[in-house]
Amino acid sequence: MTTRTFICRCEDVTVKDCDAAIEAGFETIEEIKRFTGMGTGPCQGRECMVPLCTLLQERGVEGSDALAPFTARPPAAQISLGALADGARESTAIPTPTSSPEGEDS
Amino acid sequence: MAHNHRPIRADEGDRRWTLDGRPMRRAREGETVTDALLCAGELALTRSAKYRRPRGAYCLRGDCGSCLVRVDGRPNAPACTTKIRDGMRVERQNLHGPDGADPTALVDRVFAGGFDHHRFMVKPRIANELMQTMARQLTGLGRVPDPEVQVRGTPEDLRPTVLVIGAGAAGLAVHERLAAAGVDVLTVEREAPSRAPAGIRAATAVFAAYPGESLFAAQCRAPRERPSEAAVFGEHLVRLRPEHVVFATGTREPLLTIPNNDLPGVVAASGLRASLERTDGALDPRCVVVGPAPYAAARARELKLATVLAPSQVRALEPRGSQLRVTTDDGHHDAPLVILAPPPAPAHELPVMAGAKVQFVDAQEPACVGFVVQRDHTGHAGIMEGPHPIHLWAVGGVCGITDRERAIEDSQRVARTILATITSTGGSAPP
Amino acid sequence: MGRRDAPLPEAVDLAIIGGGVMGLATAYELSKRAPERRICVIEGSYLVSGASGRNGGGVRSQWGDAGNVAIMRESLAICRGLAQTLNINLWFRRGGYLFLARSDASAARLARNIAVHRSVGAPTEQLTAREAKELVPELDVSNVRAATFNSEDGVVFPWPFVWGYASEASARGVAIRTHTRVTGLGEARHAGHDGYDLTLHTGESLWARRVLNATGAWSPVLNEMLGIDLPNRPHRHEIISTEPLKPFLDPLVVDLDSGLYFSQSTRGEIVTGVTMHDVPGGEDDRVNLGTSLEFLERMAANLTAVLPLARALHPVRQWSGPYDISPTATPSSVALLDTPTSSRCVASRVMDS
């Protein structure tokens, strides 16, 4: 087996990949996330964000006071679309649909 | 990767279950799928997205997302939080070909130097199109759900005065203090222990804060026991509109960057400890703990293990038969599990969604590495702005207070402040 | 491909404000046509931080008027070889777009559109509900009245579009400065030419003969500095992606009656969104990147009605991004849908001026 050191196991992102992103000029956590894909899998950064921060500190990329987590977004725990859909049926204030830019045709 | 060495020895229970159609050691009540897998020595669950490396469970407590399996015809269920039901069918995902002979495993060797997915096989176009078609087949986890799978539940709307998120030592301390004073307090806990403390709502995981709607949203999971309803998953949405929220979300164990830290059999220490409690099992004493000194030593004591290594001592980590070989400058250790003991990292996501501020800390005191919630001297962590402002409070691990006694003391202090706030603003005050 | 410390010239022929896909594609097209021009791109945050990094990646020619169909068909043709031109994987996959109509009004709209498509030679097919189900067997088509399908349409992964244009523009001498906000903009003469002075939040300043406002939904802020009042405004759209599944869904599916759309990415995630009425915070015309449970519930209800198996799936991320909307409530640029073509048009206009 090839020896690799991972930052993010969901998307197979290694320390080497993060170093390459830093080399290409990406310096912030948001940028490195997008360029390498780290933190975009099922764990959403729960496992990999802190190791990346530690790496950035070691590389002297950002002072620790400048480190900010990438945007926290729902869901922070697993919820199924079925449970959410049933929530909508019970909700009284669901608006009627209008057309969307994706569905727009003019 | 062959793995039949059993890292945990535990008595058999009475719950029958199968892995990829094979009957396994019967599980005890309360055991999760990963507990049962550790007892069976079945550690590899899937192959990774890019290099097709074998992967298994790491955190063992619902955070890392690398133990997703197919359960009773439903894809992408976390094995570590899914309790074994009698007759349960568990299947591994994203494997091509028979176990141990997946031809796609070659990818790891062919691309030993790594590859840049942005520039990989871009030209010529025909090769690029072929590469994309293959990539699409190799990524993705589970197959679509079986047609008979159903998700069934009834949504709930709850308006407690105080919502406490997390029923660890810190959350419980707040709950007890407020409940004793007659406050309408609801404490939710994502885990489903067999014996939940009184007044605590278990198996309820808050998944979001929505400032624009002044609410928090949680998923509530019903226990799955009835064999006749194998394909029915009871799960519903809980909309929570409290006046105060106390974040007691604690900490988790992120990855440590040692070589081959992704191998099946590399697991997190605290998650493993909880697993041992559920199975009442005995851990193979040859297991090795790896981590920065104070954390690794503490976790090794808890797990009663003798071999403790600093991350910098690990020169190599490789599969060796059914075990993992850890090589150091002084020799090597063959271990059924390599247990990582990273500094705890605050579970900061929910407070951040609600508008609390966090700061990165990397220090022994507080004893954590990660983003800690910022709060004033009373424990107040700001207000969730929206149509109905909600007061935010934080206690314990999520603020970097990882010592149990200190966390309880801190929580009792914050609970007194919350009580004083509620009393002084009237309205929702206790009698 | 864009750095916080990229040096900026004191004077440029063109300053493009906004490092999204439109700004960078225009910089790239111009740098190819007029290599002697000095061009810079100034981005307030990081590349792909705006709408270019937040959309669902759909590219289609199925529109309601001949002009849009023609632009989009040209964009799709460019897309086919664009990965090779930009030397980056764009993950463009022609799975087609399947439109579903569940009301008479929507069915009539599809019938009108297909006539337009045929008049310009687009290979859009009219399908029955049963034929739609043959295309995607997992669909519930019990209420579907009519459907159309165009196999030339597809999906891309939007981020590499931005990086690809940025790399190629930067290789041709375009200065791309990130994490730098324009705080002042005013008319000024320099070396006998009319132009503009730009002040940056870093304290730097530069003069540009021409300025291109490519900040999309954020553009009213810059327009205000020059006293320009345009009626475009931001419109928030939310979107989710689910845990990855093995590939089963080829086309991007649009349900016209609910404004729902969904597709499957190369990595296997279902990427899906649904139209909402206007948005919290939308009234003051500022970009709002928040998310809501109302959206999540409504999206889930509409998606699971059309794709019942989705009831057992889990979202992994919910986010939002702004469309830049004109007074007729049509997007003035639908994220990256038309960029390959539009950027060429803009580049030609700038050249002419």
Image: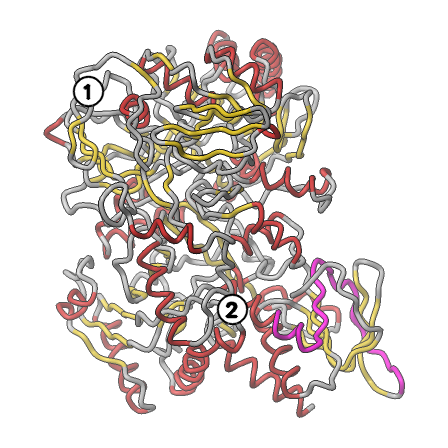
Disc 2, disc 1: CB below 8 Å?
Answer: no
Question: Which residue corresponds to the image point at 15% horizontal and 70% vertical from the top-left?
Answer: C131
* In the displayed structure image, the side of residue A83 where residue B418 appears, left or right: right
Residue A66: image x %, image y %?
A: 71, 42
- Chain letter of disc 1 in the image: B
**On screen, B123 above or below B418?**
below
Evaluate whether residue B163 shows in this view. Answer: no
Q: Is residue C173 magenta?
A: yes
Tag 1 residue: B26
Residue B246: image x %, image y %?
A: 53, 24
Question: Which residue corresponds to the image point at 39% horizontal and 45% vertical from the top-left?
Answer: B53
Front residue of C227 and B27: B27
How dense is the environment of label 1, judged by Cα within 10 Å: few (below 14), some, or many (20 and up)?
Answer: many
Evaluate whether residue B97 shows in this view. Answer: yes
Tag 2 residue: C88
Question: Which residue corresponds to the image point at 67% horizontal and 64% vertical from the top-left?
Answer: C2
Amino acid of disc 1: Arg
Residue B243: image x %, image y %?
A: 51, 27
Residue C252: image x %, image y %?
A: 32, 65
**On screen, C243 above or below B209?**
below
**Which quadrant does the N terminus of chain B fall into?**
top left
Distance between mark 2 and mark 1 Cα atoms:
51 Å
